Amino acid sequence: MMTFASNVQAITLRRSDGAAVTTISANGPLEANTVVTCESGEGPDTVLEGFTITGGTGTFFEAEPDIFRFVGGGMLNTGSSSPTVTNCTFSGNTAEIAGGMGNDTNSNPTVTNCTFIGNSVTDTGGGMASRNNNPVVTNCTFSGNFADNSGGGMDYENSSPTITNCTFSGNSTNGSGGGTALYDNSTPTITNCTFNGNSAFTGGGIWTSDAFGGHSETTVVNTITWGNNPDQIVDEAGATTTVNYSDVQDGWPGTGNIDADPLFVDPAGGDLHLLPGSPCIDAGNNTAVPPGITTDLDGNPRFVDDPVTPDCPQAPGTCGDPPVVDMGAYEFQGTSCPWDCEPTPNDNVGIVDFLALLSQWGGPGSCDFDGGGVGIVDFLALLANWGPCP
């Protein structure tokens, strides 16, 4: 157990070898069993970098007026603390609220390149929960987290987080918001994220509600919500979610939106990169990408043109000047041999690619080289490039 009390000067705790080899585990009394706590107004100059945070069970904390709960299994930011947390993994933590990380009133951490996996709570926010604050979460992975009540991956109350280049997969709840739950006057912005394989009673991907007060307005752009159960996005009790330039299964109103299989490499195996021919390639909106974001979740360039994919075909002329950003957390980096379109490319264009093309005929797919649906133009292009890839 570790507590930062750095109201006098900033503290940096960094492990250069990274989270894979360095672990901080809970080891304290039951009433204060949060692994890492910032509680004295720490600012962004206080840095936690390169650790695995595990085994926490939360601090007995006033989660609501006169209501005490175990909060923040892995990390708790309170007392208007806003540290920088980067390259950390939060796994195997439990609590009543906020299994991986809890952020209390006016605590606005910057969380970058972190993984929240396998954390769980008996109430809200399996991976992360925030109340009355505005955290910035970039290039993070939320996978396999669980909340009994709401927010398998994330849970936000009266908060306005900025969430960019993140994936939410395999998170679950028995209640609302498998990927994220946002309510009570929350106004989040979700950009270039991917929600897949999350599950809930309602709002498998994203759930918003005003049943608890205020007015919640969620902005979603350049994002993929596909394969969540039982639904992708749910607004309740007057909350509103505005979605633009996104791929939403079963559709959602908004400029530049599509409803088409994003063609993930291997969603069952957790690989949410885009295959060649994905309708999400070169289909986002450049102006929606937050300032300073130049790379994707992998650290690869964020703006990459795929020469065989038309720019912004669903809303021509509205996505910005080339190169046009992709939808989702991962930018397709292109291929020198797009005609090698079989499920497992082997640097050769041959009969397996031909059979793949036939199986995709008339629809989208990895063999859709011109972006107009798999057809005769793609067939002729495949024949013209038959043989070993250049």
Image (cartoon, rainbow, N blue to C red):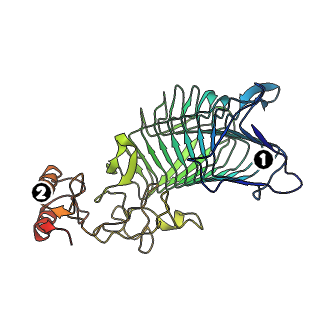
Please name the amino acid that badge 2 sits on. Answer: Phe
Q: Residue at x 65, y 44 (%)?
A: 186
Could you say which is closer to the camera, residue 350 or residue 310?
350
**Is 184 on the left-hand or right-hand side of 232?**
right
Q: Quadrant of the N terminus?
A: top right
Neighbor class of circle 1 (other Cα within 10 Å; few <14, some 14-19, many 20+) is many
Residue 41 position within the rendered picture, expressed as x and y whole percent measured from the top left: 83, 49
At horizontal 53% and vertical 43% (from top left) the residue drawn is: 142
Residue under label 1: 106
Instruction: Name the residue beneath numbered marker 2.
Output: 354
Q: Earlier in the sequence, mark 1 or mark 2?
A: 1
Q: Left or right? Give the position of 210 relative to 144.
A: right
Residue 144 point in image, percent of width and height: 50, 36
The residue positioned farthest toward the right in the image shown: 8
Instruction: Report which quarter residue 17 is drawn in.
Output: bottom right
What's the residue type where badge 1 is placed? Answer: Asn
**SS category of the residue bearing label 1:** loop
Q: How many numbered discs?
A: 2
Q: Which mark is residue 64?
A: none
**What is the C-alpha distance between the residues marked 1 and 2?**
58 Å
Residue 245 percent location from the top left of the image: 44, 57
The percent position of residue 121, horizontal first and vertical second, equals 61, 28
Q: Relative to 340, does residue 154 appear above or below in the rendering?
A: above
